[in-house]
Image (cartoon, helix red, strand yellow):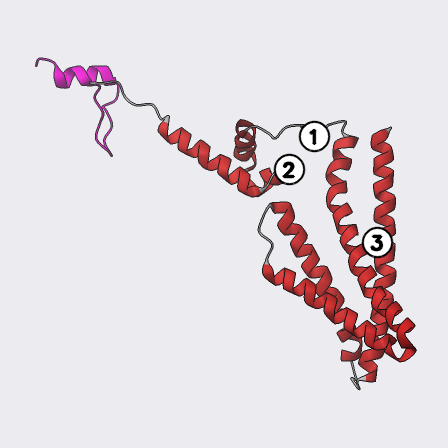
Amino acid sequence: MSNETSATRRRLAAGSAAALSAITGIVSYQHALEVVHATGSTGLAVFLIPVCPDLMIVTSSLTLLEAAATGARRPWIAVASLAGGIVWTVAMNVAAGWPNGPGGTAIAAAIPLAFVLTFETFLWLARRNPARAVLATAGQRRPAASPTPEAALAALIQSGSQRAVAELIGVPKSRVATWARKFSSAASTAAPKPPAGAFVPPPNQTAPAGTSLASANGSHGGAP
């Protein structure tokens, strides 16, 4: 029952955030359109310029979300793009509300800020919802403790992708890579060695068919 209630809350929150993001995005676009018209722009540019800062915000936010999901370092260009998009859209909205006095300016400035905050909230919910919803539907529970290196290595062998393993068990990709290196080193040091005195054929040479290592050793070390 608690899982169903929590899932309902998340769906309602995600729907509200998506609706508010759409509303504030449309209003922000109209404000920017007025400013672009007032500056004398013509043609197709009038309709394309207003959407540029919002697309910068969306693109950089999705990039940062992907970096967080894969355990990668946040790219500085995405951070700069997010900050630049916010400053740009706030500036255009303030310019649109400026002729209406302090009240109009404050209202216009609040629109893009509401868009950014609600859109980031929506992305956070969208990132967390699918995995938990699938686990709840299947009647499974996430492990209380981190998976063992043995389990991670087994998943790595089956999938062939460290990134897929990281997403599967919910850990950063760097941790899976560390496990893979540890087990690769352990496997190389634990390789079986031939017994003392056994005949080891040189590289690119194999023992004759039907001849065991023991007989080969006896033929080399025994009497003729």
The residue shown at (78%, 84%) is 41
The residue shown at (87%, 69%) is 106
Q: Quadrant of the C terminus?
A: top left
Image location of residue 72, percent across then percent down: 58, 49
User: Quick check: 184 above or below 30?
Assistant: above
Which quadrant holds residue 201?
Answer: top left
- Give the magenta-colored segment's residue range: 198-224
Give the crowd class for mark 2: few <14, some 14-19, many >=20 residues within 10 Å.
Answer: some
Which quadrant holds residue 77?
Answer: bottom right
Numbered badge on residue 18: 3
Q: Quadrant of the N terminus?
A: top right
Q: Judge from the rendering whether residue 16 lies leftward or rightward of residue 166; answer left or right.
A: right
- On the image, numbered disc 2 is attached to which residue? 170
Q: Nearer the viewer, residue 115 or 160?
A: 115
**Kind of residue indicated by mark 2:** Gly
Give the crowd class for mark 3: few <14, some 14-19, many >=20 residues within 10 Å.
Answer: some
- On the image, numbered disc 1 is attached to which residue? 142
Helix, strand or loop at disc 1? loop
Image location of residue 113, percent across then percent down: 80, 62
For marks 1 and 2, the one nearer the N-term is: 1
For marks 2 and 3, the one nearer the N-term is: 3
Asked whether disc 1 touches disc 2, contact meaning CB atoms under 8 Å apart, the reply is: yes
